Amino acid sequence: MPRRSTALLAVLCLGLFVISLDDTILNVALPALAADLGADARDLQWTVDAYLLVFCALVLTAGALGDRFGRRRAFVAGLILFGVSSVAAAFCSSPEALIAVRASMGVGAALIMPSTLSLITAVFTGPGRTRAIATWTAVAGLGVAAGPLAGGFLVEHASWRWVFLVNVPIVLVALAGCAALVPESRDPGARRLDLPGLALSGTALGAIVWALIEAPVRGWTDAVVLAALGAGLLLLAAFAAWERHAREPMLDLALLRDRRFSAGSATIAAAFFGLFGVLLLMTQYLQVVLGRSPLEAGAWTAMLAAGMVAGSPLATLLEARAGTRAAVATGACGLGATMIVLSLADTGSGFATLGPLFLATGVALATVMAPATAALMSAVPESRLSIGSATNDAVRIVGGTIGVAVLGSLASSGYRGRMEDAVAGLPAPAADAARDGVAGAAAVADRLGPAGDALRSAAEAAFVGGLRTALIAGAAVALAGALTALALPGRSPAAAPARRPAPEAAGA
């Protein structure tokens, strides 16, 4: 890969890294943030989720804007908004202000992420594109997995405000590199924006993600959750109907008939279901069961990021040797296998056991995501690179959100079911607190003194039992992703037929 191309790729991946880091860096800072700002549990939830909700609701819109007005321009605008919002977040003095600023950061991330992949796909060709996309997927996973480690370090050695300020120098370097290296790229047809499509897609994704965020809190049968989920699905159907008949649709639904696009999307969703679920559950397990500090827990889970970095070149090599289908299916089977083995962890597991498993999980994820992303993008016309990339991003985030909601709910319900005998005989308030979560059980146990040791042990065992159920469910989804991968073409995207032309070029 020429030196200039390598530098250009580094600039785009730097923008991707900073928004991926923000997916998870805040999690370990929440207790310190709550103490400083007086935030309650609901405030903390929406401090995290406002970013995710806005990002997912607007990512397709941002992709369409990038195709229409320029992908480099969208990248720069997103970096500026993200950087300014990060500074504002660091100086917030109330939970409400921080939630609003986090939503603004979500807008910036929605502009950045699809523009990075679309620019890579536009600039690189042939095997170089496959390697560049493999690097892109590794950096995306690296940011997500490195978040807890970076957040733990900053909270222990500075303050929670630095989990936002750390974004600023990264953004400034990316902006400088973009000015020097990144060319402009846009849809040459300069078609009109599909405003109804933008509105329908944004509200549909926003409603669905809101329902998934609220379901573990309100309950899956809550009327408001079911109404939001139903409304989101209806709006998604309306979006599909509109796009089918629109003169200039935002998203060409014919892409769904291309196995590279549809099977690639489904497999990526399954992989992110597992990634977000594993990070959520294992970070809690390391802290509440094994008693590790936030920094130690982040260091352990950073092995997953190391596995993704190491696995990306291996994924490229495997794809070149065996083809896309074999590479993605192998990675999905590996992900399912590592989740099954992780489910065997107990209250005495150590780094010698868990570290290699996290590493293997990262390698398996890279083996899925790099070739599946390359396959998906190889199906997208040149004029639609940003919206194709945005679809890929939306699939990742929705898959990860479903993973957090479903696996988190399974782990929580498994814990509560195993705690019924342990809380028998306790006063009702204490029993409710111990039943709600292992942290509540630990607080009750501390008040009981030596008599609380049995309750603490029971709570840790119950947490591990719920964790085991959730991880096995996640493994089943990963293995279903392996079956989906069998629909991918056998050849790698670099060896596949040339990208089909945009509708205008085909008509001409």
Image (spheres, rainbow, N blue to C red):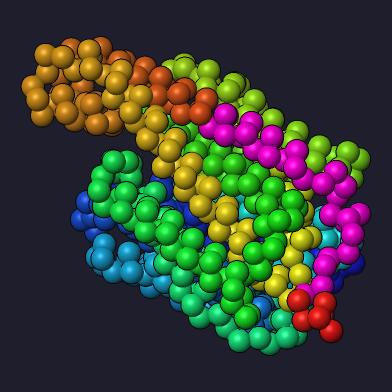
Q: Could you tell me residue 112's position as x and y percent?
A: 59, 70
- Residue numbers of the magenta segment: 474-502
**Residue drawn at (37%, 53%), measured in percent from left and top?**
230
Quarter in which the C terminus is drawn:
bottom right
Residue at the left extreme of this rendering: 427
**Above/below status of 45 relative to 310:** below
Residue 507 visible in the snapshot: yes
In percent of width and height, residue 458 lies at: 30, 15
Front position in the image: 153 or 181: 181
Which residue is painted at 24% across and 31% down in the image? Answer: 436
Q: Is residue 335 left or right of residue 218?
A: right
Residue 88 in the figure: left or right of residue 187: left
Foreground pick, 368 / 16: 368
Does residue 484 belong to the magenta stretch? yes
* The N terminus - image quarter: bottom right
- Residue 345, position as x, y percentages in the image: 51, 20
State the residue at coordinates (49%, 61%).
237
**Drawn side of residue 283 relative to residue 270, left or right:** left
Q: Residue at x 59, y 47 (%)?
A: 269
Q: Magenta includes 495?
A: yes
232 in relation to 90, above or below = above
